[in-house]
Structure formats: structure tokens, C-alpha cells
Image (tube, rainbow, N blue to C red):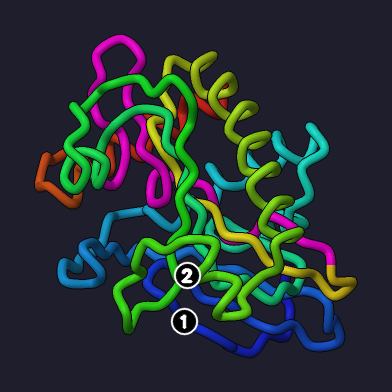
Amino acid sequence: MTLDKTLLYEGKAKKIYSISGKPDLYIQEFKDDATAFNGLKKDKISNKGVMNTEITTLIFNYLISNSIPTHFVEKISENEMIVKKVDIIKVEVVCRNIAAGSLVKKFGFKEGLVLENPIVEYYLKSDELGDPLFTEGHIFALGLATAEEMEFIKSLTLKINGLLKKYFLDRKIKLVDFKLEFGKDTQGNIILADEISPDTCRFWDSETNEKMDKDRFRFDLGKVEDAYLEIKNRLSK
């Protein structure tokens, strides 16, 4: 599919384009670039853009089939998809099922501890400030979202978590934790945006607990491309 597009924004892992004659739609292009630790570590992961496009397509189609509103419209090339135009809410939502990452480093949880209930956290979407953890009080004070909107976002996050935990476990993958972004479409509805991939989730093999996500890049564990490919292959079956 050939479309007349104009680059609007380039982030760490994706580019966003407007489409001539289609004011309510964007093109989201996935890059091979990889970053960690707020951009301090940078490299490229071979074919990451292609793999994350396919993984996100599979997951978003699954969520849409289960009545989750998303920005996804269709995949149009190996590393591009058409998405609905959204105004991103500058609140990154993290849902945690198993202790890892900052729960271990900052709060003293034992890695691998299965949480009795999911923990939902909020981070200010700001590269300049290092995406700090913050509370609903901060969100309201900054005018980023209303109490009603945050209640909806949390409820939708927990619904997505329930769907994805089963979806991945059926494919012998533990969903340890994951980051979501939400935005408002042109009608003002809050919908799921961005991506869901090994860049934004922690995935562990359900039998061996082998890490199958960007932690392999963060901590120089090796076989980064193999891990992304294994996730794609398991979801494609």
C-alpha cells in the first residue's frame, strides 16, 4: 500500500506520519533502534521493527476481538500499521503481576514473587524528567486526566491484564509486567494506543523463567533477536 505521508514525530522506537487526505488516521512505523535506561544505552536490534509490528498486530487484534478499544486499524507493511489519530495522555500505565525490575531494585521485592493482586503504577511521560513514578494526585494537579478518566484507564488496564495473562500463558509465556499508553481519539474516547511488544513488556518462559524481552538487551544477556523471534513465533501459532 502506497500512501502520501508526512513525518510528524520520531521517538525512540517508532515514527508517526500523517496521511494525506486522511485526517483521522496516522501511520505508525516501527524502528530497529533500541534504547534502555532513559536513552543512556542505545543500539539496534536486527529486524526488531518487523517483529514488533507483527507482535503488536496479533495482540491488538486479539484485544479488539475482546471488546478493548484500540487505535489499531490495519497492518500495511512489514514494519508499518495504520492507526487512529489520538492525543496521547501523558500518563504511562504499568501493570505488574510478578516482581521484577523496579519492584526489586527500589522496593525490595524478591524477583519472581507472584503478586497476590496486580499492582498498577503511573509514570509521567516525560523524557526530560526521566519518566518519574507519580500518583493520581500529581496527575490531577498537572491536569493530565480527570478522576473519572483515570478510573476508566485503571479499569481498562486490569481488563487488558486479565485477557493477556491467559493469552500468553496459553503460549507458555508469563506476563510479568507491561506498559500501556492511552489517548483520546477524534471523538474524545479514551482508547489503547502505542504498542504491546517485548519492548514494552517483560515476558518469561512459563517453564524455565528465561527472559524473552528487552531485558536481554538492557542487561547484555545475549540472544536478543532470538527472544523477540520466539515471542512472535509463539503468538503466530
| Quadrant in which the C terminus appears | top right
- What is the quadrant of residue 124 in the picture? bottom left
105 or 74, which is in the foreground? Answer: 105
Q: CA distance from mark 1 to mark 2?
A: 6 Å
| Quadrant in which the N terminus appears | bottom right
Could you tell whether 66 is left or right of 102 in the image?
right
Helix, strand or loop at mark 2: strand
Residue 148 drawn above or below residue 177? below
Instruction: Verify whether residue 203 appears in magenta.
Output: yes
Could you tell whether 233 is left or right of 149 in the image?
left
Type of residue at label 1?
Answer: Glu
Give the image location of residue 134, x and y in percent: 42, 63
Judging by the rendered image, the residue that carries numbered circle 1 is 10
56 or 150, which is in the foreground? Answer: 150
Q: Residue at x 21, y 63 (%)?
A: 37
Could you tell whether 55 is left or right of 153 in the image?
left
Question: Badge 1: few (under 14), some or many (20 or more) residues near its Cα, within 10 Å?
Answer: few
Residue 153 drawn above or below residue 145? above
- Numbered mark located on residue 210 in the image: none
The answer to whether marks 1 and 2 mark residues whose Cβ atoms lie closer than 8 Å is: yes
Q: Main secondary structure of the magenta part?
A: loop
Range of magenta residues = 189-215
Q: Residue at x 69, y 42 (%)?
A: 155
Helix, strand or loop at mark 1: strand
Question: Badge 2: few (under 14), some or many (20 or more) residues near its Cα, within 10 Å?
Answer: some
178 or 50, which is in the foreground? Answer: 178
Q: Residue at x 58, y 88 (%)?
A: 7
- What is the quadrant of residue 187 in the picture? bottom right
Residue 67 drawn above or below residue 194? above
Judging by the rendered image, the residue that carries numbered circle 2 is 14
Instruction: Verify whether residue 120 appears in magenta.
Output: no
